[in-house]
Amino acid sequence: MFPFDTLISINKANNTPIYRQITIAIINAISNGVLKPGTILPGTRELSKLLGVHRKTVIAAYEELNSQDWITIIPQKHAFVAENIPHLKPKKWNKNTPPPSYNNPFPIRFKTVENIVKKEHDHPIPQLVIDDGRPDIRISPIDSLLKTYRTLTSRKHTSNKAEQEASQGTINLRQELVRYLSETRGLTISVDNLLITHGAQMSIYVAAHLLSDPKTTVLVGKPNYTMANKIFEQLGVNLIEVSVDENGLNMDEVEAICTQKKIGLIYIIPHHHYPTTVTLSSERRIKLLELSKQFSFAIIEDDYDYDYHYASSPYLPLASGNHHGNVIYVGSFSKVLDPSVRIGFMVAPANFIEQATLFRKTVDVGGDSYMQDALAALIKDGELKRHLKKARKIYHQRRDFLDHLLKEKLSDYITYTLPPGGMAIWLKLNKNSEVTKLYELTRRDRLLISNINEKQNALRFGFASLNEKELTEAVEIIEKCLKLITAD
Amino acid sequence: MFPFDTLISINKANNTPIYRQITIAIINAISNGVLKPGTILPGTRELSKLLGVHRKTVIAAYEELNSQDWITIIPQKHAFVAENIPHLKPKKWNKNTPPPSYNNPFPIRFKTVENIVKKEHDHPIPQLVIDDGRPDIRISPIDSLLKTYRTLTSRKHTSNKAEQEASQGTINLRQELVRYLSETRGLTISVDNLLITHGAQMSIYVAAHLLSDPKTTVLVGKPNYTMANKIFEQLGVNLIEVSVDENGLNMDEVEAICTQKKIGLIYIIPHHHYPTTVTLSSERRIKLLELSKQFSFAIIEDDYDYDYHYASSPYLPLASGNHHGNVIYVGSFSKVLDPSVRIGFMVAPANFIEQATLFRKTVDVGGDSYMQDALAALIKDGELKRHLKKARKIYHQRRDFLDHLLKEKLSDYITYTLPPGGMAIWLKLNKNSEVTKLYELTRRDRLLISNINEKQNALRFGFASLNEKELTEAVEIIEKCLKLITAD
């Protein structure tokens, strides 16, 4: 008889029930060819003694094996390995046969998106994080949102109705957005011009896919929002970087490129360019729309933080300007509510939205329709507007407070231009201090600066999510570390 | 002077505030070249009279234009169009110049995912929906989930900590899943083998992308889950369909193909094949794992409704069998909780999960970490298990009830095999009744059959979401319509 006690090793500390451990071991032995078709299995009493388990456990295992056709039980007699198992190359039985497991690397070639460099620095867990410009969830109206969410789910009326409209976004949310985008951004659209996505990133991904292939030339700013560049790299397009100055992307460069080659697409963040926060001037806006018409290229306008402006009204988006329907406008509520609540949207002509919806379904069937309807209610009630008014005031104060702190503490080490809006300041370090060094030193002091740019020797200081005490603390740590660096 | 009153048309019924309507009209006129740099604008008093609006409204518009550099205001004198606007080809002023709008089709070539055929049948809104196998949200524990969700958000401790781990899934949920998948599916994995996605579709999408390019040969069942096929079509792979019989995909066919050409990947649903609900036999499972090792191809195992089995324990997944780490296992909680709560997962070796996480970030930054942690709590508390036990009992009764109804009412028109689990029955119509006709007739009777298969002359009858009254009603409408069809 087979050494069933070595074949089946039971681990009582394991979370898998013992009868399952037995089942799995026997299935593996059959699959391996160790137990051949027709092999008679030990009786349940016998095996239970061998393994030191209750007889009922063995019976449960045999019943499961039987129900799955791995073994045949002849009542009152015995059980044997089923005959209709195909003949397999028998392998030498080895006590050390590795268990089925995912411990080893994937054995087949697959695409590498990025080489992962493991940096093991043993940094302490950060106590303070300077993010790249995110809202303060401590003031977000998420509780209101969830109250409505619960009310909506408790209705549970027509079972899967909501699910069916989730690919494009619920009609309630799209209707509210038509009104909201008209009021806040001067957009003239209908519900057919809107696709709701799982965050703005998905909108950019979908639009980029529909508009480009490896032969397409795509223009982006230098520097640019990294996660947008990654999409284009992945699509294998011909990516050309256009320089960015204090008035945004350089349109003379864009024009020069257009006269030399066919451009398919430009990705632009005219309101507060990421990461440098500059605003595209009206002169350049006009020129961009002119060029896009003349050379027939599409524009993806990423307007991620339109809602935050302090000095004056923000520039209206390109999408509400005089274009010919070639501007795909992308926005998000993650910057307004909470980064966890991922609701973004895309505005485009209806025929584009139709195909974008179909494409989106292959990536992600649809969004959470309750959450979408809860957001629609938040907009309709005016609660979103009230929240934005409050947030704008708080973030404005925090920006000014940070401005004051930076002038007072860091003016010897950095330069920056105060942005008229948004949630972050772009700080350029002077030549004698390297931003990577600053990152390392502050990290040891439990401050994580999440967005640094090595090439530009700069960092993005998100001020919205930190209160005055936290801002002071963060700037003081940076000051201390910069003193150390420049003293070297 | 320009005819400002025709240039600026104000619509008081419009949701856009009037001062913004004025701003937009003037910006457009400047962009169009209708208003040239240096043009002096009418005084605020004068323009307010011309337009019939309050003077303060015009002042607000001018201030906004000024703050955005479109115009220059010389206090106590006048305002004029800013000089630094580039020289534009002037266009003939036309009262009928179309407003900036998304009404027209997108003017640039883009990819067509699918040709859209508009079927305008003027069907009434359905009162009853036969879905393709979805849970009954009336019994789902979503309220518990949301209670926990609210508790989690109200803590609002370390601001963006949760957001940072959202790309791969929160550590809480991954830890719970390691335990849960071991207990329920015999999987031996760690948190590094898990990627949480926005539904199972996203897991399939990501895995398919990493594993294939246009040169890859991919095998799928015929018929197959349409939304998986769409991913492969979009990737442009060489797709080969393998026939499906009562024991699942035909492995002799798979073997024959393997000996002829290099296979990159097979997509398979061994538990309850979609749409036909058949289970892959143990003989074929062993053969598939053998072949995948011998010919070195990857397996995407889609196990969308593992949790529902009525007759006996379900077959363990391929992923817990004796494979060599080449099985990418995909599952979902949308079938357990509510289709709106989109949480799916992928199991694979850690190096594959790393790249899958990076790829996923380009598509979708991350999931809702509160929802993920709320689900983790639901699993930890045992509430998910209790819910599944209850749901299994109810769906088992509904399956048997439907079986009884079908035998009693429809046995002259259809054939089917009762599946041992899952949430749907695959009904094949006899030759004399066409499923498309049935769809049309029932649709007029306010019953929507959401998943029909024209080629197979069959439909998928999801029984889980309908109670006994609803099942009876649906079958009676089908019976009535089939009588009509066969009487023709």
Image: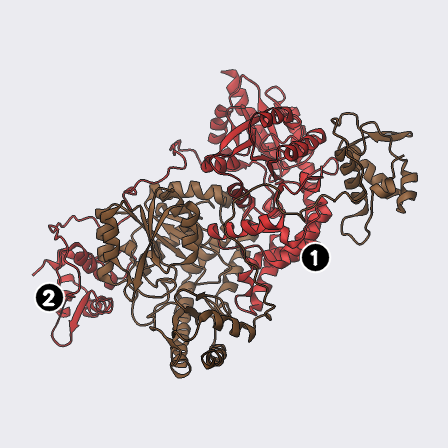
Chain colours: A brown, B red
**What is the spatial separation of the Cα atoms under label 2 and label 1, in whole angstroms?**
72 Å
Q: What percent of the width, then of the height, locates residue B119?
A: 39, 31
Q: Residue at x 42, y 82 (%)?
A: A409
Looking at the picture, does residue B327 appear above or below residue A127? Answer: above
Secondary structure under tag 1 reads: loop
Q: Residue A117 in the image: x percent, y percent?
A: 54, 58
Helix, strand or loop under label 2: loop
Residue B394: x %, y % from top left: 68, 41
- Foreground: A271 or A2? A2
Examine the rendering and report whether any part of residue A356 can be seen: yes
B111, above or below A152, in the image: above
| Mark nearer the N terminus (2 vs 1) | 2
Q: Name the chain under label 2.
A: B
Residue for badge 1: B381
Residue type beneath disc 1: Asp
Q: Residue B432 in the image: x percent, y percent?
A: 53, 16
> The N terminus of chain A is located in which quarter?
top right
Q: Nearer the viewer, residue A41 or A244?
A: A244
Going by the image, does B313 lie left or right of A410? right
**How many numbered marks have been drawn onto this rendered protein structure?**
2
Residue drawn at 70 percent across, 30 percent down: B281
CB under 8 Å between discs 2 and 1: no
User: Farthest residue in the front direction?
Assistant: A488
Q: Nearer the viewer, residue A214 or B165?
A: A214
Which circle marks residue B40 in the picture? 2
Going by the numbered disc 2, the residue's amino acid type is Ile
